[in-house]
Image (tube, rainbow, N blue to C red):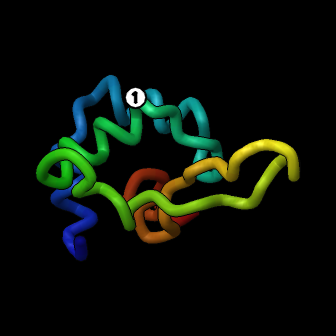
């Protein structure tokens, strides 16, 4: 799980574009979480690269967001 650069290299350009559209603290869609899992090696392998974010609403489930070091690699230091 320490190879953030390898993870980012394994994402498809359109997946990186989608991540850029939601921003560094944007909630990840299930489709993007699956892409991160795939890039990390298979089903569930991306856990840890994405983490629980702050709840936007206490009545809704907590969103998943990218870990800070993954954001830094994708967004250049954000």
Residue carrying label 1: 31
Within-10-Å neighbours for mark 1: few <14, some 14–19, many 20+: few
Residue at 70% x, 47% y: name it.
61
Q: Residue furthest front?
A: 59
Q: Position of residue 77 (x, y in %)?
A: 51, 66
Classify 71 as above or below 12.
below
Name the quadrant of the N terminus: bottom left
**Total labels drawn:** 1
Q: Residue furthest bottom?
A: 2
Q: Is residue 36 left or right of residue 33?
A: left
Residue at 47% x, 37% y: name it.
19
Name the quadrant of the C terminus: bottom right
Q: Position of residue 33 (x, y in %)?
A: 39, 41
Q: Residue furthest right?
A: 58
Provide the secondary structure element on which disc 1 rests: helix
Residue at 46% x, 64% y: name it.
72
Between 59 and 23, the one lying in front of the other is 59
Q: Position of residue 25 (x, y in %)?
A: 64, 52
Q: Position of residue 21 (x, y in %)?
A: 56, 30
Q: Please identify the quarter of the rendering in which residue 73 is found.
A: bottom left
Q: Residue furthest top?
A: 14
Classify 2 as above or below 60.
below
Residue at 60% x, 35% y: name it.
22
């Amino acid at each position: 799980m320490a190879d953030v650069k390898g993870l980012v290299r394994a994402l498809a350009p359109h997946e990186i574009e989608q991540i850029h559209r939601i921003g560094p603290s944007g909630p990840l869609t299930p489709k993007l979480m699956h892409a991160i899992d795939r890039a990390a090696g298979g089903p569930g392998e991306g856990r840890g690269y994405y983490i629980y974010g702050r709840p936007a609403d206490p009545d809704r489930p907590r969103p998943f967001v990218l870990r800070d070091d993954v954001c830094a690699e994708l967004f250049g230091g954000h």
